[in-house]
Image: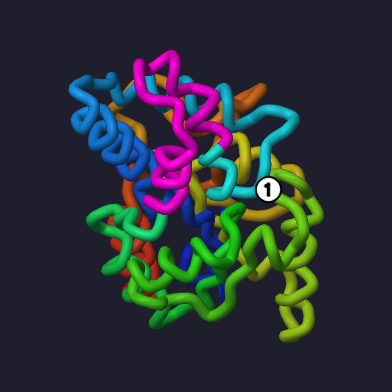
Amino acid sequence: MSKSLSEFKYMTFDVVGTLIDFEGGLKTCFAEIAAEVGSTVDGEQALSLYRAARYSKDADLFPDDLVRVYLAIAPKLGLPTEQKYGERLRDSAKSWKGFADSAAALASLAKDYRLVAMTNARRWAFDFFEKELGNPFYAAFTADDTGTEKPDPAFFEKVFDYVASEGHSKDDILHVAQSQYHDIGISRKLGLTNCWIERRHAEKGYGGTIEPAEFTKPDYHFTSMAGLADAVAAARARL
C-alpha cells in the first residue's frame, strides 16, 4: 500500500511537461515561424522530430539546446534553417504557459507541503517558469544547480541531501511528474513514492518526451494537477 497523501512533508515536481506546457509552447513557435514564411507544420510531427533530435549525444542543456534542435529539424519541417529562428525557439521558453490547472493546484498544495522544483531546464528559464506558476516553490533545483539532468540518480541525490539537511528523508517525499523516462522510472528505483501526472492521456504516444524502455506503474496516477490537489484535499479531510 502506498503512503497516504496526507503523510508527506515534501512534494518534488518535474516542471517542464508536468507544470509548464512545453509541447504547446514549441508547437506555437513552430506554427508562427511557418506562417511567416507562408507554410504550415504538423504539431505532432514537429514534436516527434524534436524528441529524436533533442536526445542526441551532442545535446546541450535545455532550453539552450533548442537552437541546435531547430537547425537540425527545420529542413524536415520545410522551415528556414537560419540561426535567428533557432534562437527564437529557445527564447520562446520565456513565454511558455503553465497548464490551466498548474498554478491553482500548486497554491493549494503549498499550504500543506514544502514544494520543491526539480527541472532539467537551466536556471534562467526556470526563473520565467516559476513566475508563470505563481512562485509556489519552497526550493528549486535546476540543471545548473545539480550539474546533471534527470534521470541521472545524482540529480535526485542532491535533493535527498537537501531534505536530509532539514532533518527529513526521501520517505517524506512524493515525487510528481509526467515523464516516465526522466522521473517515474528512476524515482521508483531510488525508493521514492511517486505520482504520475499523465498529461497526454487523451493523445497517442509520448509527444516531446523520450519513450521509456519500460513502463513503470506509479504509486499515484492522475491526468491533471487538479486531480492530485483534489485527492490531497480529500485525504486531509479524513484526518
The residue labelled by disc 1 is 150
Q: Is residue 82 left or right of residue 122?
A: left
Q: Name the residue type under label 1.
A: Lys
In the displayed structure, does residue 105 sit left or right of residue 148?
left
Q: Secondary structure at mark 1?
A: loop
Q: Is residue 89 magenta?
A: yes
Residue furthest bottom as drawn: 166
The colour scheme used here is: rainbow
| Residue ID at (42%, 64%) | 129
Query: In screen coordinates, is 233 left or right of 120?
Result: left
Q: Is residue 238 visible?
A: no
- Number of numbered discs on residues: 1
Relative placement, left or right, of 93 versus 114 is left
The percent position of residue 222, horizontal first and vertical second, equals: 38, 45
Q: In the image shown, does 105 or 49 lie closer to the viewer?
A: 49
Which range is magenta?
Answer: 68-92
What's the residue at 38%, 25% (across, down)? 80
**Residue 11 to residue 168: above or below:** above
Q: Residue 111: which quarter of the image?
A: bottom left
Q: Position of residue 71 (x, y in %)?
A: 51, 29
User: What residue is at 53 percent from the left and 80 percent from the top?
Assistant: 138
